[in-house]
Image (tube, helix red, strand yellow):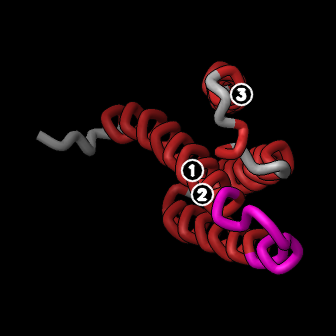
């Protein structure tokens, strides 16, 4: 189990590295206006909410019958927190709101997609081990 948790954290670091590289490429190409001035706030929020969501979902893994409740609860918390974060910053920002929103949406979907992919790859071996193979 520790190995899979490490893979999750390595995945988070990999996504952060990819966003950092994308930022460097855009700056080198002379397109820094595609990056919000709050880019690292978006990344910090995304990592934090992903870790919280992962923690909630991992609690549900110990209670197999209620896993779906934990998963849906964590996704609901993630979505509501994202909406409040986005609303607060859009109301606060006076310029480049569109760039901020686009940067935020890309990060939100990247981290959410990673978490869902991670859960699916880790739940499939458990399902096959318990005899619930889909043929």
For disc 1, the neighbor class at 10 Å (few under 14, some 14 to 19, many from 20) is few
Q: Residue 13's image quarter?
A: top right
Counting residues from the start of the chain, the first of labels 2 and 3 encountered is 3
- What SS does tag 2 mark? helix
Residue bearing mark 2: 102
Q: Mark 2, mark 1: which one is toward the viewer? A: 2
Q: Is 127 in front, or is 8? A: 8
Whether 9 is drawn above or below 69: the answer is above
- Tell me whether circle 2 and circle 3 mark residues in contact (CB < 8 Å): no
Task: Report the span colored magenta.
Answer: 87-99
Residue appearing at x 68%, y 20% in the figure: 28
Q: Is 87 in front, or is 112? A: 87
Counting residues from the start of the chain, the first of labels 3 and 1 encountered is 3
- Residue 112, image x, y percentages: 56, 51
Whether 58 is drawn above or below 31: the answer is below
For disc 3, the neighbor class at 10 Å (few under 14, some 14 to 19, many from 20) is some
């Amino acid at each position: 189990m520790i190995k899979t948790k490490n893979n999750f954290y390595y995945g988070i670091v990999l996504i952060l590295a990819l966003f950092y590289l994308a930022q460097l490429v855009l700056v080198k190409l002379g397109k820094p206006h595609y990056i919000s001035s709050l880019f690292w706030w978006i990344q910090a929020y995304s990592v934090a909410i992903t870790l919280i969501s992962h923690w909630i979902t991992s609690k549900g893994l110990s209670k197999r019958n209620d896993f779906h409740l934990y998963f849906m609860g964590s996704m609901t918390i993630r979505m509501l927190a994202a909406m409040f974060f986005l609303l607060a910053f859009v109301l606060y920002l006076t310029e480049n709101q569109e760039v901020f929103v686009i940067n935020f949406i890309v990060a939100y979907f990247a981290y959410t997609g990673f978490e869902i992919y991670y859960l699916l790859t880790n739940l499939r071996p458990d399902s096959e081990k318990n005899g619930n193979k889909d043929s």
